[in-house]
Amino acid sequence: MRLSGKTAIVTGGASGFGAGIVQKFIAAGATVMIADINGDAALEMAVATGAIACTVDVANSGSVKAMADAAIAEMGHIDILVNNAGITHLPTPLEDVTEEEFDRVLAVNAKSVFLTAKNIVPHMKSRNTGVILNVASTAGVSPRPNLNWYNASKGWMITATKAMAVELAPKGIRVNAINPVAGETPLLKSFMGEDTPEIRAKFIATIPIGRFSTPEDMGNAACFLCSDEASMITGVAMEVDGGRCI
């Protein structure tokens, strides 16, 4: 029960890596709010797991504030924030990505970290404790061609993690990131362009361990980094990628 007595918000927690993190956190004893733009999916998973559901658009300031207020009202306080919600554009030459696609990717992947910090960091500071985990990507370390602005958004998240960590450490708040490689999530088809056995094989050939990341992989890594066992770890962007970035 590594997270016994802890409270957590997991954005994008209704599916994919977020769902794996939610399930691991609950198994480890945490009280969890599943915050997702798909409110029906969040509610369905909350009923199945004993979590709390919240509909949120992480790119909208008012929506993020409402999420933070609801979390404090329902759980009493927030120990852990996992910024997992994310999107991508389809594989496209960088000059052909539309301005609307660019704006949406940066809003969901980057601005969301700013908005959650703005609304939750003051609460953590008031308690002199807290953990923030940003779900970045190997794309921010070793970019893949044609995922250009998605790569950049995840590189931004990794730098933001380090900047937040050094500023917030004196306040008792740790900030880390995990960098998954592609996995069996709703975004996989978007990363690959199309989902065929041949494209999957080509993708997996770039991962030395020879498989995609799983939600369970992310849950296990997140659980450790958000637990008191990792109390001396901050500012780390840990690759959970089967050797992809070596």
Image: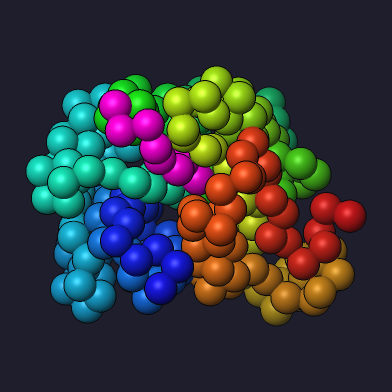
Q: Quadrant of the N terminus?
A: bottom left
Indicate the position of residue 243 as horizontal and vertical percent values: 82, 62
- Residues in magenta, as a range: 126-133
Residue 71, position as x, y percentages in the image: 19, 45
Quadrant showing the C terminus: bottom right
Q: Residue at x 39, y 37 (%)?
A: 129
Viewer can see residue 3: yes
Please, is residue 235 above or below residue 246 in the view?
Answer: above
Q: Residue at x 55, y 20 (%)?
A: 167
Kindly indicate the quadrant of the structure image that contains residue 93: top right
Q: Quadrant of residue 34?
A: bottom left
239 or 31, nearer to the observer: 31
Q: Left or right? Give the position of 6 relative to 175.
A: left
Coloring applied to the structure = rainbow
Residue occupying image coordinates x 22% and y 37%? 68
Q: Is residue 165 left or right of residue 56?
A: right
**Where residue 59 sits in the image (x, y, percent)?**
34, 31
